[in-house]
Image (tube, grey):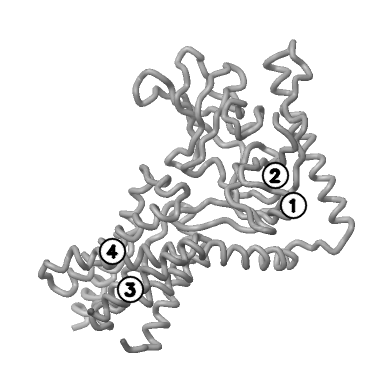
Amino acid sequence: MDPSRNRTILYILFSLLLLVVGSALVSGVGSRLGFLFSGLFFREDDHRDEYTRTLILELMLENARLREISMKTALYRELLGYIRLPETRAVVARVLYRTEGLVGGGFVLDRGRADQVEIGSVCIAAAGLVGVVDRVEENTCTVLPVVIPGVLVSAVCAESGAMGLVSSAPDGGLRMDHVDMAAGPRVGEQVLTSRFGGVYPDGIVIGTVTAVEEGSRGLDMTLVLEPAVDFRRLGEVLILRRTGAE
Amino acid sequence: MRFSVRDQTIVALTVAVQFMLEVTLGRVLAAPNILVPVLVYLALNREPRWHVQGKAFFSGLSLDLLTHQPPGTSSLSMILGILAARRLLSATIAAGEVSFYLHSVLASIFSDLLFILLASRPPGAYFGVGTLLVIPRAVAPLACLVVVQILLFRIRSDSA
């Protein structure tokens, strides 16, 4: 057989092997190294740091609760106190790095299996929803942000109550599809997660409606959204750990 | 197969530049793909019988590790992309320069499409309007090369 062909097949097999097991090998080692070397950039030798982080965690959680209360108050005045983040425990995490290139945008955080983070855990920032945990290593995890293709979020408009499915837009923003024309969504209103998706707790801010367009089939509407979170400047986030079924 | 320090250095530098392009221009719109044209150039001019699989494999692996992509994705997409372009154009008879440009553009586009298919999660989820970015990624570096060549030609003509 042609030696050039043999070499090509060999390298293709190597690449396939890497694709299958390489991620686990590299991310296993990288997870540990990333955890060790994160100390170079983030000092953790001071008890005050731990205290500050705990304080930040509490404030972020409080912020999320207050935001939710504010939304619910405006929406359902008669149902004050109907809060939906009751049994949620959270762990604060730092963004170590993000994936780059033609297919990029995933965030690698410094919390993993050791911190009881699981695949499907929801990640939020102070401003709103970041995404969902897609991969978990011992000390790190990868979050797929809502602005990348393949991530779908069941959502509801805060004021009009219009429901739809939020996904990434070609320009890097967000869009909300399959919105009922009769619901009358308006520009400027906030879009929140709804409980119907089963993945995200309801009431987390996703973004704000910037434009209302007719859907592709003319029977529904598409909303253009400005994400609530600035994904270029993500530093600290919260990973929500579910302690029980909602 | 022969080992050339100069060629290895060229590939290593290209990987470094490609990485810098990905984290700068790639965040704005699309980073030009310069690694594939360099590999095609080496395949056409330096290597006997297109022996660039090794360079494509190791440069792709390095780039994947630098950009935190699943390891092996760039390697596989570049090897298969260059192979596909070569197979597609093997029947054509073209002058050296045109052959290089055609091979480069096709190999870049094939590689990028394969990369999107393999790297996105779930596989293929990234295909959409944004996929059209593979065209400027493939064409931009070669367009720059053409402009530079024309400018050099004019400068030489003027000085002659």
Q: Which residue is mark 1?
A: A115
Query: Mark 4 to mark 1: distance in Å?
Result: 44 Å
**Which amino acid type is shown beneath numbered disc 4?**
Ala
Query: Mark 4 to mark 2: distance in Å?
Result: 41 Å
Query: Mark 4 to mark 3: distance in Å?
Result: 10 Å
Query: Residues at badges 2 and 1 in contact (C-beta under 8 Å)?
Result: yes
x, y percent for residue B18: 44, 67
Q: Which residue is mark 4?
A: B107
Q: Residue furthest top?
A: A78
x, y percent for residue B129: 36, 42
Q: Secondary structure at mark 2?
A: strand
What is the chain identity of the residue bearing mark 4? B
Question: Who's the residue at 57% across and 37% down the image?
Answer: A227
In the drawing, does residue B102 fall left or right of residue B12? left
Q: Secondary structure at mark 3?
A: helix
What is the chain identity of the residue bearing mark 3? B
Towards the viewer: A60 or A187: A60
Q: Which residue is mark 2?
A: A239
